[in-house]
Amino acid sequence: GFAFLIWGIAIFLFSRISVKHIEREMAKEGIEPPLWDKGIGGRLMMYAIVIVTNKVAEHSLVNDSAILRHTRTKDYSLAVFLLISSVVFFTLMGVAYYLYAPVN
């Protein structure tokens, strides 16, 4: 339960602080958020990965160069927090499933 809470806080902070800032700055340049992500938040992890790796991919579903252009130091910290909390949460979920799943 605690890992889920931390992961939820990480998603909330990253989306409200970092993604909001990056997309506001991208909108000033006339760059729209990805059309395929209509409210489900799939772009959050992609933004975080781009920010942490600090690389522009040759083929990407998001605008890597625009994301990196508008990234601040706190955005990097929040992206690391999001990725680490995600890995911890999903690892714990996998272990819990393996240990406590019903045996048929």
Image (spheres, helix red, strand yellow):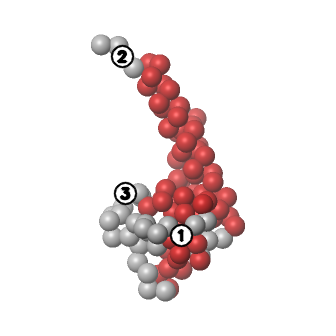
Residue at horizontal 58 percent and vertical 72 percent from the top? 68
Mark closer to the chain start, 3 or 2: 3
**Would you place residue 80 above or below residue 33 in this image?**
above
Q: How many marks?
A: 3
Q: Name the side, left or right, on which 86 lies relative to 103.
A: right
What amino acid is at disc 1? Val
Residue at the extreme bottom of the image, as rendered? 29
Residue position for label 2: 102
**Callout 3 crowding tier (Cα within 10 Å): few <14, some 14–19, many ≥20:** few
- Please give the label number shown on residue 56: 1
What amino acid is at disc 2? Pro
Circles 3 and 1 in contact, beta carbons < 8 Å: no
User: Gap between marks 3 and 1, in whole Å?
Assistant: 24 Å
Residue position for label 3: 40
Front tag of 2 and 1: 1
Residue at horizontal 46 percent and vertical 73 percent from the top? 63
Picture coordinates of residue 95, whole percent (x, y): 50, 26
